[in-house]
Image: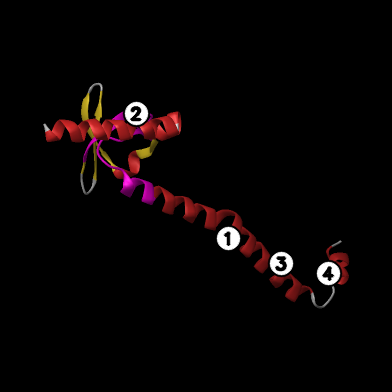
Amino acid sequence: MLTIFLQAQPQGSSSMMLIMMGVMFVGFYFLMIRPQMRKQKQEKNFQETLKVGTRVVLTSGLHGRIAQVQDDGFVIETLSGKLKFEKAAVSREFTEARFGDKAKAADKTAEKKEIETEKK
């Protein structure tokens, strides 16, 4: 049976095999590796742009507000108190994900109130 398969292969099949392997590698790169790198880059930018007062959801499902930004992490204020977490633990911004444009408008009014109270 093996001799039938070996006889059926043409002589130029090794170069065709290399071309197919190359096409598969390029396909894997564009379908798997590149999107993952893009996602990691977006996540890092998201974590770097977080500021005090932003409501976030952590990867563990904990909801809270950023009370303090440190070099190695965040201090998250929850109903049970303040807890320190690594920056990588922040999964998403809670207010924008849940409320959309309404949350942005509410944040702007809250910032205005904070500025007014600081002036007084």
Q: Are marks 4 and 2 in contact (CB under 8 Å)?
A: no
The question of residue 50 being in magenta is answered with yes
Mark positioned earlier in the residue sequence (4 or 2): 4
Q: Are marks 1 and 2 in contact (CB under 8 Å)?
A: no
Specify the amino acid type for callout 2.
Leu
Mark positioned earlier in the residue sequence (1 or 4): 4
Residue 119's quadrant in the figure? top left
Please state the horizontal and vertical placement of residue 96, each as a whole percent of the image: 41, 34
Report the residue at 85% width, 74% height from top: 10
Residue tagged by mark 3? 20
Q: Residues within 10 Å of mark 2 (few under 14, many from 20)?
A: few
Please state the horizontal and vertical placement of residue 29, each as a whole percent of the image: 58, 60
Specify the amino acid type for callout 4.
Leu
Number of marks in the rendered image: 4
Q: Is residue 94 visible?
A: no
Residue tagged by mark 4? 6
Residue tagged by mark 1? 29
Indicate left or right for 120 with 2 as reference.
left
